[in-house]
Image (tube, rainbow, N blue to C red):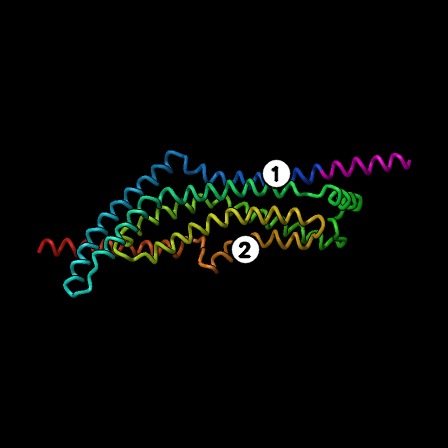
Amino acid sequence: MFIFDFVADVVLDQIVDWIYGKIVSFLNDFFAMMNNMGVELFELPWVQAVTTFFGYLGWTLFVVGIVVGAFECAIEYQGGRGSVRDTALNYVKGFMAVSLFTVLPVNLYSLCVSLQGTFGTAISGLINPQSIGEVAQGALMTAAIPGIGNPILQIFCAVMMGYAVIKVFFANLKRGGILVIQIAVGSLYMFSVPRGYIDGFTQWCKQVIGICVTAFLQSTILTAGLLVFPDHPLLGLGLMLSSTEVPRIAGQFGLDTSTKTNLMSGVYAAQSAVNLSRTVARAVAV
């Protein structure tokens, strides 16, 4: 009987170690796959057609911005405040922006997704089989979450884990679409950049960086929480829940991942472009 119990304990340790490692690896690979879906979205023909359209729109607004910028420079020269050097520098900034705003966000997002998958796979290999096996064996024997004996607390931890996983899942699912919207809105700033008004475009760049950083951090912190949970359940649960707060924390440092403010400022830039184009057309007609 002693030999049977000893063999059963060893076999149970190995089985639980294998199952837990596979679960962590599966979740890491699953979220990496979800992020890759956002990258693969830009390989679809209709998405490429949309980005091409807004790329042409950006170039059109850039040309209009160059013409308006030249008129503004001439008007300022009449008052003795014009600067050809600043105007030429704004043109260079606008050319770089219009050349990269449909390409660089996708490549940066793809890089962050690739890094997340590689880094998550690396840290998931740091599981300590002995400690996890011992804790998980006790969990199976007592039908409880390791380190937690209160059934109500067990249910609470299970619900919180599910909440964190589901919220990160839906965040990863919609991130590719948000990036498409960001690229579409970014075209509206191409009118302002060659004229020297880059505040809105700078905020747009921060939002794109925020999306890429969030894609890397959310899944990585969630995987780290799963690794910590067997030995320190509440600490691991806190890490998993903190992964859902990454967009909000990034927004506090100017890396807002929402599109509401960006969209309104982009619409304002487009309205300004239309109004100034009408003013220039009337002036030329007169």
Q: Which residue is mark 1?
A: 26
Q: Quadrant of the C terminus?
A: bottom left
SS category of the residue bearing label 2? helix
Residue found at the far bottom of this picture: 79
Circle number at residue 91? none
Q: Amino acid at mark 2?
A: Glu
Which quadrant would residue 133 be assigned to in this image?
A: top right
Q: Which residues are magenta?
A: 1-17
Query: What number is the disc on residue 245?
Result: 2
The residue shown at (31%, 42%) is: 55
Quarter of the image where one finds residue 106: top left
Horizontally, residue 189 falls left or right of residue 240, namely left
Residue 71 horizontal/vertical position (percent) = 17, 56
Pointer 2 local density, CA inside 10 Å: few below 14, some 14–19, many at least 20: some
Measure the alpha-carbon separation of dots 2 and 1. 23 Å
> Which residue type carries mark 1?
Phe
